[in-house]
């Protein structure tokens, strides 16, 4: 498929960088302050009893607001000004998005989407490996409630299309691409076209935490919603938890906001303000992190202590190269090293790092490294680990914004010390 307007992506990117600083915020509503105020109020004063009646009728879906009508706020568990500003400013960052919703963690975003759209008896097709918390949610919480998850290995397009065709009562397809920690990619266009062959078509959701919103644009490929752990690149400083859902169709988020109001997992005003202030630099940070990671990963690929580097620009399988070229702008800030010498070598490597810290999580300005088999992926059994490509020799690195030459030296020194 050729893009009818090849400049469109670039134009969207330009608009995004500008709009993220201006959209959704009216200084007059914050006594003229250039940055939004923080509205720390649990409840909101109505201008009249009629306005209160209209606000409740709107919140309960009994009426739709007139064009241009300002619906008054009710109570902060439902929504509040800082969430509304944040949600308005996330939208231009996600190409193809028309709406966004904020949550108090990435898991809150994922749980709320799944609890809204997966009823007892529903099928969910998902790629493996998925984030550990998501795996738990599916198998510990949703299976006992009668939801039926079907796992498909990341990158196996035929198996994914088959599962999408054959799973009974399929309500949702949940794809994590690239997969963690091997960065195996799943073809989103193919998943969307398999989903669209079904009636009713299931919702296709992508956990876009690793490459979005800067380098991968699932909504432009027909995906319905993107999920984010905003804790990672969106917030970018390893100092807060947050979650975001973006959607092409705003109506899809209306019942999700309803579930959020029951669960009370909206992001709080202070955190919304903090996350909002990080959005204008997401593009700068991710570009620097991706450049750093690519320079380092490609140099480490030749090191005698490194058996293999998992990184998109180093993919060897033609199908993986094809997916990367078709759906990602840049390879991103995360690579995994498979070391010569197994677990002992991996632990030695982590022990000898001087700049990079041994911690889970990713996407922050500072570089972090961890041993997935004994930490983030330790609840998987040996068979699951093997099928996910997670072995004892693997170390995952999230590259920060330090000078790449210092980081390369850090890794070469730690490799030499094994
Ligand atoms: C961290 C992460 C999550 C969970 O997000 P939290 O903000 O920790 O709740 C989900 N998916 C991916 C890919 C993640 O990296």
Image (cartoon, rainbow, N blue to C red):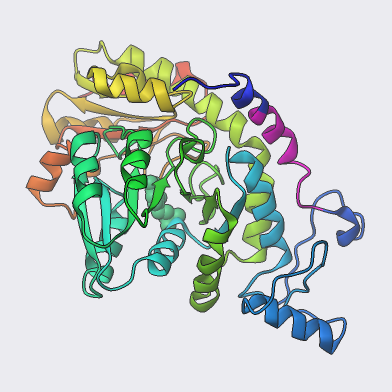
Whether residue 156 appears in this view of the structure is no
Q: Nearer the viewer, residue 91 or 34?
A: 91
Q: Residue at x 42, y 38 (%)?
A: 210
Compared to residue 227, the image places residue 143 above or below, namely below
Residue 6: where, in percent of width, then height?
A: 58, 19
Q: Nearer the viewer, residue 386 or 119?
A: 119
Compared to residue 416, the image places residue 213 above or below, namely below
Residue 270 part of the magenta segment = no
Q: How many marks?
A: 0
Q: Nearer the viewer, residue 348 or 197?
A: 197
Compared to residue 301, the image places residue 387 above or below, namely below
Q: In which image quadrant can residue 369 be found?
A: top left
| 76 sits left or right of 255 in the view | right
Compared to residue 102, the image places residue 313 above or below, namely above
Task: Tell me the magenta residue range.
Answer: 12-25
Residue 391: where, in percent of width, then height?
A: 14, 36
| 12 sits left or right of 167 in the view | right
| 110 sits left or right of 24 in the view | left
Q: Residue furthest left?
A: 383
Q: In which image quadrant can residue 95 be found?
A: top right
Q: In which image quadrant can residue 138 be found?
A: bottom left
Residue 15 part of the magenta segment = yes
Residue 39: where, in percent of width, then height?
A: 75, 67
Q: Residue at x 31, y 42 (%)?
A: 194
Residue 232: where, in percent of width, then height?
A: 48, 45
The N terminus - image quarter:
top left
The C terminus - image quarter:
top left
Q: Residue at x 17, y 30 (%)?
A: 345
| 96 sits left or right of 194 in the view | right
């Amino acid at each position: 498929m050729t893009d009818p307007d090849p400049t469109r992506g670039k134009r969207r990117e330009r608009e995004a960088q500008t709009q993220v600083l201006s959209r959704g915020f009216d200084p007059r509503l914050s006594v003229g302050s250039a940055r939004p105020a923080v509205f720390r109020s649990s409840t909101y004063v109505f201008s009249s009893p009629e306005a209160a009646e209209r606000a409740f009728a709107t919140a309960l879906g009994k009426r739709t607001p007139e064009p241009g009508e300002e619906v008054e706020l009710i109570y902060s568990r439902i929504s509040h000004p800082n969430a509304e500003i944040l949600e308005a400013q996330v939208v231009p960052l996600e190409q193809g998005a028309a709406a966004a919703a904020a949550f108090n963690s990435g898991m809150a975003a994922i749980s709320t989407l799944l609890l809204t759209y997966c009823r007892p008896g529903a099928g969910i097709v998902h790629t493996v490996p998925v984030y550990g918390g998501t795996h738990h949610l599916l198998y510990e919480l949703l299976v006992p409630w009668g939801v039926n998850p079907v796992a498909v290995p990341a990158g196996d397009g035929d198996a994914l299309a088959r599962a999408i065709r054959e799973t009974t009562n399929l309500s949702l397809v949940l794809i994590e691409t690239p997969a963690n920690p091997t960065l195996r990619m799943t073809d989103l266009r193919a998943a969307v076209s398999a989903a669209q062959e079904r009636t009713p078509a299931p919702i296709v959701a992508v956990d876009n935490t690793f490459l979005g919103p800067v380098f991968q644009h699932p909504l432009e490929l027909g995906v319905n919603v993107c999920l984010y752990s905003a804790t990672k690149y969106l917030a970018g400083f390893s100092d807060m938890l947050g979650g975001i859902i973006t959607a092409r169709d705003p109506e899809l988020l209306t019942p999700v906001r309803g579930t959020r109001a029951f669960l009370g997992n909206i992001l709080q005003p202070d955190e919304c303000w903090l996350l909002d202030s990080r959005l204008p630099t997401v593009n700068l940070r991710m570009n620097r992190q991706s450049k750093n990671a690519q320079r380092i990963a490609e140099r480490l690929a030749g090191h005698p202590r490194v058996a293999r580097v998992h990184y998109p620009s180093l993919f060897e399988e033609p199908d993986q190269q094809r997916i990367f070229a078709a759906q990602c702008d840049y390879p991103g800030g995360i690579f995994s090293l498979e070391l010569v010498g197994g677990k002992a070598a991996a632990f030695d490597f982590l022990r000898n790092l001087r700049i990079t810290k041994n911690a889970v999580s990713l996407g922050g300005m500072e570089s972090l490294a961890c041993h997935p088999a004994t930490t983030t992926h330790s609840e998987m059994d040996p068979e699951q680990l093997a099928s996910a490509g997670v072995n004892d020799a693997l170390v995952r690195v999230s590259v920060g914004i330090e000078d790449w030459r210092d980081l390369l030296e850090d890794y070469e020194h730690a490799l030499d010390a094994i």
